[in-house]
């Protein structure tokens, strides 16, 4: 049984994240979506709300487990017998940070492999920060987020 852990802030979860998870399910038997507390990022949603949105999005997927965490990712992976970290890559701009993160995690646990997937082209520009910004100004982001997330965001303004 191959288990991967997909860590992120998910503030909020987007269809880009969902696409990454769906690709991960082709590679692994089980995916643990780990919602990081990330206080340094001053998230818009508290960690429980972000976890609620992830849970609502994947309510019917038996191969997905969800949790929140605030410790070291490598410790969490060991506790749950995960052998890989799943991450998504959008543009070159993601690469530098992801490269450093993967190198650090490898230093901490040489057995834990980082695996990167690319979401569908139409989601390469989708980020949680854009979703937050556009929806806070009344823009319609419904095509970019899971249906379950709609109720958590400000209502879009009618044109
Ligand atoms: P973090 O704070 O760990 O970067 P995020 O929730 O922003 O958390 O992202 C989690 C992971 O999902 C990262 O690897 C990020 O690159 C990836 N990701 C986010 N949005 C997309 C997308 N639209 N396409 C592909 N990967 C994505």
Image (cartoon, rainbow, N blue to C red):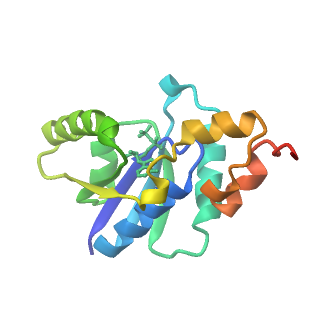
Left or right of residue 44, residue 90 in this image: left
The mark total stands at: 0
Q: Position of residue 20 (x, y in %)?
A: 41, 60
If the image is split into quadrants, where does the N terminus sit?
bottom left
Q: Residue furthest front?
A: 159
Q: Residue furthest right?
A: 158
* Residue at 57% across, 67% down: 58
If the image is split into quadrants, where does the C terminus sit?
top right
Placement of 71 over or under 34, stated as above or below: above
Placement of 65 over or under 60, stated as above or below: above
Looking at the picture, tell me which residue is in the foreground, 56 or 120.
Answer: 120
Q: Position of residue 74 (x, y in %)?
A: 27, 44
Observer able to see residue 45: no
Q: Position of residue 97 (x, y in %)?
A: 29, 33
* Residue at 51% across, 47% down: 126
Looking at the picture, tell me which residue is in the foreground, 66 or 138.
Answer: 138
Left or right of residue 14, residue 3 in this image: left
Placement of 157 over or under 147, stated as above or below: above
* Residue at 37% across, 47% down: 90
Q: Position of residue 137 (x, y in %)?
A: 75, 33
* Residue at 22% across, 41% down: 102
Looking at the picture, tell me which residue is in the foreground, 35 or 14.
Answer: 14
């Amino acid at each position: 049984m191959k288990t991967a852990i997909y860590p992120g802030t998910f503030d909020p979860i987007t269809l880009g994240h969902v696409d990454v998870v769906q690709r991960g399910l082709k590679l692994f038997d089980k995916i643990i979506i780990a919602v990081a507390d990330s206080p340094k990022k001053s998230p818009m949603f508290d960690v429980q709300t972000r976890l609620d949105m992830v849970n609502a999005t994947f309510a019917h997927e038996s191969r997905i487990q969800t949790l929140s965490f605030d410790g070291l990712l490598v410790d969490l992976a060991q506790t749950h017998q995960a052998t890989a970290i799943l991450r998504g890559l959008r543009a070159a701009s993601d690469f530098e940070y992801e490269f450093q993160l993967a190198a650090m995690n490898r230093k901490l646990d040489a057995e834990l492999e980082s695996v990167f997937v690319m979401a569908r082209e139409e989601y390469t520009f989708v980020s949680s920060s854009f979703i937050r910004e556009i929806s806070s100004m009344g823009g319609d982001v419904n095509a970019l987020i899971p249906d379950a997330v709609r109720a958590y965001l400000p209502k879009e303004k009618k044109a």
